[in-house]
Image (tube, rainbow, N blue to C red):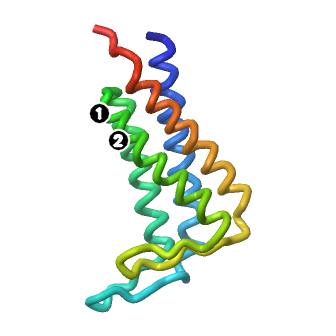
Amino acid sequence: MAFRVAAVIWTAIALVVIAIVHFSLAPQFDLVQTRLEGGFVATVGQLFRVAAVSSAVLAVLILVRPRRWSALVVASASLAGLVLTVASTVTPIELPFGLPMIPVGPWLQLRVVTAAAETLAVVGSITIASLRRPK
């Protein structure tokens, strides 16, 4: 039981770190934008804010409801984020639906921090999902 509680705590901390990094980077990427259908302008900064809010919500979710389903949601989101983080380190990523391209930037140290936090969130959430909840 103690290991499961530790996994919940480290997963939530990792998600908070991801949220902080994305919130801090968002203003720098507000200039990278594209115009979508209907005239709406989307920026990478907005996408970073969405990622930050999502990570914060998932941190609260895993703390409040550390169940198998919530752990699998966290694992899926964190794995997707990890793939995007690693892939965007190598090459700019073209997003679907006309969303702006995520550029390769000089923020390598924060990518390493984010990738490490996302890895911890994936491992922690898989641990939570695989261990039985105490009755």
Circle 1 residue: 69
Identify the residue at horizontal 44%, vertical 58% (top origin).
51
Residue 34 higher or lower than 48, as above or below: below
Residue 65 higher or lower than 76, as above or below: above
Q: Quadrant of the C terminus?
A: top left
Q: Quadrant of the N terminus?
A: top left
Q: Mark 2 touching mark 1, by CB under 8 A?
A: yes
Residue 73 placement: quadrant:
top left
Q: Kindly state the secondary structure of the residue where label 2 is placed.
A: helix
State the CA–CA distance, disc 2 to disc 1.
6 Å
Q: Residues within 10 Å of mark 1 (few under 14, many from 20)?
A: some
Residue 95 higher or lower than 2, as above or below: below
Q: Kindly state the secondary structure of the residue where label 1 is placed.
A: helix
- Residue 73, disc: 2
Residue 111 higher or lower than 27, as above or below: above
- In the image, farthest residue toward the bottom: 39
Q: Is residue 94 left or right of residue 91?
A: left
Residue 38 placement: quadrant:
bottom left
- Residue 90, disc: none
Q: Position of residue 82 (x, y in %)?
A: 54, 51
Report the amino acid beneath label 1.
Answer: Trp
Q: Residues within 10 Å of mark 2 (few under 14, many from 20)?
A: some
Report the amino acid beneath label 2.
Answer: Val
Identify the residue at horizontal 52%, vertical 33% (top origin).
123
Identify the residue at horizontal 42%, vertical 47% (top origin).
56
Identify the residue at horizontal 54%, vertical 49% (top origin).
18
Q: Position of residue 132 (x, y in %)?
A: 35, 15
Say how many tags the image has. Answer: 2
Q: Position of residue 122 (x, y in %)?
A: 50, 38
